[in-house]
Amino acid sequence: MRGFQTFNPQLNDFNPIRYYSSNQEEVELALEKSQKAFLNYSKTSPTLRNELLLQIAQELETAKSIIESFYCDESGLSKVRFELEFTRTIFQLNSFSDFLLNDWKKLEIFTPSNQNSPSLRKTQLGIGPVLVLGSSNFPLAYSTIGGDSVAALAAGCSLIVKAHPMHVGTSLEVSKCILSAIRKLNLDEGIFQHLIDDGIELATQLVKDERIKAVGFTGSIKGGRALMDLASQLKTPIPVFAEMGSANPVVFLREGFEDKIDHYSKLFAQSICNDAGQFCTKPGLFFIPKSEKGNELGTKLIEEVIEHSCFYMLHPSIQNKFELLKKERASLVSNLLIEKKGQLEPMQGRQALLQVDALEFLKHNQLQEEVFGPFALIILYEGNDELKTCLEILEGQLTGSIVGDSNKSTDFEDLIDLLSTKVGRLILNGIPTGVLVDEAMNHGGPYPASSDSRFTAVGTQSITRFLRNVTFQNFDEYS
Amino acid sequence: MRGFQTFNPQLNDFNPIRYYSSNQEEVELALEKSQKAFLNYSKTSPTLRNELLLQIAQELETAKSIIESFYCDESGLSKVRFELEFTRTIFQLNSFSDFLLNDWKKLEIFTPSNQNSPSLRKTQLGIGPVLVLGSSNFPLAYSTIGGDSVAALAAGCSLIVKAHPMHVGTSLEVSKCILSAIRKLNLDEGIFQHLIDDGIELATQLVKDERIKAVGFTGSIKGGRALMDLASQLKTPIPVFAEMGSANPVVFLREGFEDKIDHYSKLFAQSICNDAGQFCTKPGLFFIPKSEKGNELGTKLIEEVIEHSCFYMLHPSIQNKFELLKKERASLVSNLLIEKKGQLEPMQGRQALLQVDALEFLKHNQLQEEVFGPFALIILYEGNDELKTCLEILEGQLTGSIVGDSNKSTDFEDLIDLLSTKVGRLILNGIPTGVLVDEAMNHGGPYPASSDSRFTAVGTQSITRFLRNVTFQNFDEYS
């Protein structure tokens, strides 16, 4: 029987527990139970689903220390980060609870009958059993009971989570909390299924199974696109919401940052380096003007990044890919990689920057691709025309940031308009990392940042990914 | 140079005008203009877009008689039907105008800043240039300035309409109205482009062009699926909203129709036969209980359908396919086709019914497929278990209707639940044809009724198909 272990980046060694991929009987049973549970669960009241989410939060609190232990051992992320992410996970559960109590009814639209026409009541129903494939870099907030899962459960969908193999221990502990909450509320256990696989075979099988009606995914463009292709070619295509890669461009305008060079250098260095830059919103492209102040900013930003403390990478394969990509980028343009020096622990990410001219950036499309980890590319631009040309060739992004003074730049509006066609979120004078869980948040963007820019992956509005319309006509007397 | 003519079903002859497919220069220019116009148009105020829709309505009123003449000559539809559809088209324009004035601002979500977090303003932006491929059976309300087009223009998207070749004359007259309105408001003419082709080549080319960002389609499952496949396999996949086929099941419960057999027979016969049943919501499957009253209903429904007056089919190819399909269905089960007798005009649709046993229905999956035209299948069921088995094998549908008394049926709720997983709209004691343009309407359903059950094709909510989220973070001072 095939088994696998998770990896402890701090110890640079595998964790002792051996996990086994779910066998075909388990998979079939999970699908069967999920489909069966869906019909009743989709009809539950928003109040009951609200109770379920609150109960899950409570179970997580009870199991917090054991979850923390697995979380840190399997990710190399710090206890400080665990606290932040745990809090975020609880906050998400609470946000959706509030949504179910206060805003669910707003999704319903009712038009009464009149002499000429019958009544119409447009309601929202869960789309069906949802498969969630969580991300490696958020073992809690975007994983087993992360944003996708909470949105699916809130929508009245039964849920199958395929655990991320890099933190399967954390995932199992969280899954126990979800199951415990379901049992305490006397709900059907089929609502939640937890499956394990360390390859792509199980995910592929699940997406192809006609009982699965939607997919939530967070990960690479390659992985997300493969799922999209699979789902769109099915006899009955299903929606895949994939939140994928993004290089998150940051534009320093020609004016408006000069008296805050220290402030912005520190702020963005932190945004690049924190937790080894392993965030989908890590700023990876910096457009900086060729000017005295621009040069000062670039120099200072490099200094701050290089001096920043190092963090562990999540997994050897991520570490290896990071090392490979930053070297590839540098050799592509034959420029020097500006890298942190000195001895590091084996799994610590060595932050690096690369500086290129805008004209060079325009020559190599690969330069705009995401490098997952503490790396950023500085692109020096001459004038706004050059800047615009660079922005025009960008692919879809989760975020775009602009630093400058809107009153001093004649092109400010043009740049905002241009960037808004490329991104899902625009940040003025701030950093893109730290995605607030809020109904006004948009986390998603034009492809390849996400599979469907009409939906967000973060915030209560993300529930609409897993809901479909059903209008009841002439049902007044009945309901 | 290749040319083609439209067809007059009443005269059973081609109309005299010869049309020519757009050439490659015209197509390229249209795409270029559409892309250029989008950026400015997407930034226009909802008030300005509201004015545009109202102006289009006014231009249509002015051109009404010439549009009517083309409409009737090209479709075989009556002047009465023209009036209804014209009114509906104007109503749609007005509804979206109202939406822009009163409801557009509700799409925006604002969260002010606080000590810990910046402000977030989630806005909606047009997704980009939209391609609309209208339907043959609604030359006005679902075509050139039909539901998809109005939604796209309201959303701030530039619009390319590929005219339906069966009513290209009507389409051209309507396109003149749209262009005239754009000119009167001094807007960029690139907002609207009208292209012509009598094959599938141009549509294929347009979907593949990276300047097109979304597609609206109304037509067959085969056509819709081909577009979905094309769009999902692009380097940058784009959303296709396809409203496709539906057999629109009608369930007569065992009790609750007995004292209204005459009423329901007339009502549903009209729903099957009116305008030769060429509606996507035409009821095509009737589940009728095997009982004295059920038999009486079936007999009466057949009688009413057969006695109903005949209407012209839209086009020889639709007529031929209709004749072929109803015969195919009958030979499949070796049952007698119950058909209207007597001499008809060449292009009149000869209404027909076929009656089968539920067990036979379960044996032939083809029987549940849509027959476009005045045809319905009566399925006689023994008990509710048999009925449920039949409903369970149904594919996704636009509508499902239930006739009966909710108080007398023990299985009423179960049946509603079951049907609601299959359809986009449920009708109690009424007919599915006559889709109200209303924000509480849902016109769409699980695949293959539509490509994405999360969206509607009718009513102001359909605007969300062509909008994407953009969140502005920390823009307080600027905006």
Image (cartoon, coloured by chain):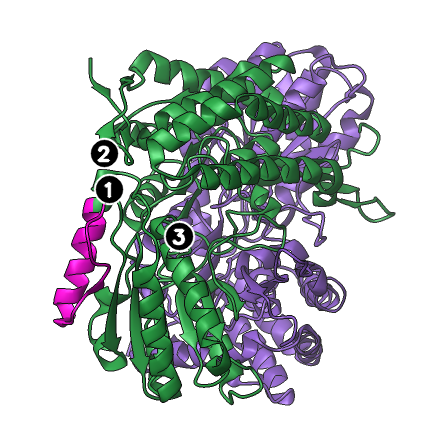
Chain colours: A purple, B green
Q: Are marks 3 and 1 on the same chain?
A: yes
Front-lying residue, A68 or B408: B408
Decide if residue B47 is on the left or right side of residue A220.
Answer: right
Q: Are marks 3 and 1 in contact (CB under 8 Å)?
A: no
Is mark 1 in CB contact (under 8 Å) with mark 2?
A: yes
Q: Inspect this view and state whether residue A322 appears.
A: yes
Chain of the residue where label 1 is placed in the rendered structure: B
Give amino acid for label 3: Asn
The one nearer the camera, B127 or B357, is B357
Q: Secondary structure at mark 2?
A: loop
For label 3, the crowd category at 10 Å Cα-Cα, with few meaning under 14, some 14 to 19 and many 20 or more, is many
Residue B347: give its label: 1
Q: Which residues are magenta?
A: B320-344
Q: Which residue is mark 2?
A: B12
Image point 41% across, 53% down: which residue? B450
Nearer-N-terminus badge (3/1): 3
Quadrant position of residue A151? bottom right
- Mark 3 to mark 1 CA distance (whole Å): 15 Å
Instruction: Measuring from the top left, give residue B479's x and y in whole percent.
Output: 80, 29
- The percent coordinates of residue A27 (x first, y second) are 35, 77
Tell me the crowding category of disc 2: few under 14, some 14 to 19, or many 20 or more residues within 10 angstroms, Cα based.
some
Where residue A477 sits: x, y (%)? 65, 75
Which mark is on residue A378? none
Horizontal and vertical percent position of residue A14: 44, 68
Classify mark 1: residues with Cα within 10 Å, few (<14), some (14-19) or many (20+): many
Label 3, on which residue?
Answer: B274
